[in-house]
Each structure stands twice: as structure tokens, then as C-alpha cells.
Amino acid sequence: MQNEAFHVEHRPAVATELFGDRVEIADQYANLLVRDGEKLGLIGPQEYPRLWTRHIINSALIAPLLNGTVGDVGSGAGLPGIPLAIARPDLQFTLIEPMERRSEWLTQTIAELKLDNVTVIRARAEEIADQHAFHMVTARAVAAFSKLIPWTVPLVEYSGELVLLKGQNAEAEITKAAKLIRKYHLEDVRVEMVGEDFDTEPTRVIRATVA
């Protein structure tokens, strides 16, 4: 699918390595993002030329790190939750998104993609902390680590883990969050690069165990 004003990145070869026999579902997801992204404010058209590399592949690279039930805070356009759910049909994902328009799109999208391992909750993370607990919680392009800690930690089971997709300032974000790291009893807080063995840009994550 092509957008009139912007070239849309073709699916890179690494996608088949990451999604296997479910790569066609990832294709469908990419098409839905192109179709609805600009119209619904999910993703800007300037992102189309790097849609796969910067967004879908970037999200899917962390799939091997996950286990159990996974909450995706501030899911927005379904990143990273939907690519992860495609890559890991053995896990259960919950997309947490407060905006009505976006949560409705997410619900429609998982129905179109026939993803039976995904549910959507329209709420802010802090509103559901007493109702849900996940083995792992992730987030991408939502907020700085210091802001994410009070939103995400209450959603994680004891000894569960945060896996937060981050940019080049990840180490600095950890430093700035030192007080909150202690307050919320986070352990083994570190930055990891994921996917360096693949022919694509690796993904940077902040990982932390909730003690």
C-alpha cells in the first residue's frame, strides 16, 4: 500500500526471521498503519519510509525477552504490543490505552488480524493497578523512565520485570530516576541492546526487576 505523499518502506528480509510463518499478519498490520495512521493521529506520514525498521522491527526485536502475561502501557498505535503479539502467539498481551479513538482502533485491528492473544483496556495505567498484574510490562515512546516508574511498577507482579523501549538517553534517564528506583524497589536496572545479531538497527531497552 502506498501513501500519496510518502514512500512506504518495503518489508525488510529480517521481518521473516522475526515473525516466521506469521509475517503475513505483520504485513497486514503495516497496511493498517498506513491506511489509518495519519487520519487517526496514530503515526505521522513522515514515518512511512521507515515504518518497518523504526517501528515494527524495533518493537518485535524484544520478543525473546518476554514471558508470561505482558502489559503494554500507552499502546497508542499498538507499538510494541501488536508486533510482539504477532511474534509471540504463545503469550498473552494486554494493550492499555486511555484515548477512546486509539483504543477503538486497537480493538478493531486485533479483530482484523485475528489475534486471539491480545486484549485492549481503555484506561490509564494508574487506574487499573489494583485490578491487573502482569509478569512483564513494556512501553514505547510514552515518557521518561522517571515518569514511567510510578505508572508501570504497580502493574507488575512481585519479581516481575519492566522492559521499556528507549532511545539514546536511556542511561541518563536511569541516573535521573535514582530516587524513584529506590522508592519503588527496582533491582538490576540496566540498559541492554537487543537484536544486534540481526541485519537491522538494534533496539535499546531499560530492564528492571520489581522487588
Image (cartoon, rainbow, N blue to C red):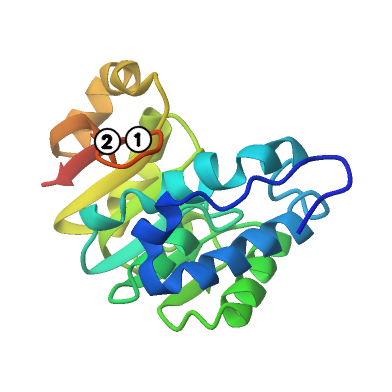
The residue singled out by tag 1 in the image is 202
In this orientation, which residue lies closer to the viewer: 136 or 20? 20
Residue at 82% over, 50% down: 3
- Name the image quarter holding the N terminus: bottom right
Which picture quadrant has residue 208?
top left
Q: Are marks 1 and 2 in contact (CB under 8 Å)?
A: yes
Q: Is residue 152 above or below residue 208?
A: below
Give the amino acid at mark 1: Pro
Give the amino acid at mark 2: Glu
Q: Is residue 113 left or right of residue 83?
A: right
The residue singled out by tag 2 in the image is 196
Question: What percent of the width, then of the height, locates residue 126?
Answer: 44, 53
Precedes in sequence: disc 1 or disc 2: 2
Q: Is residue 182 above or below residue 111?
A: above
Residue at 60% over, 57% down: 98
Crowding near pointer 2: few (<14 within 10 Å), some, many (20+)?
A: few
Question: What percent of the width, then of the height, locates residue 202?
Answer: 35, 35
Exactly how many numbered labels are in the figure?
A: 2
Question: What percent of the width, then of the height, locates residue 111?
Answer: 60, 81
Label ID, residue 138 = none
Is disc 2 placed on a helix, strand or loop? Answer: loop
Q: Is residue 37 left or right of residue 210?
A: right
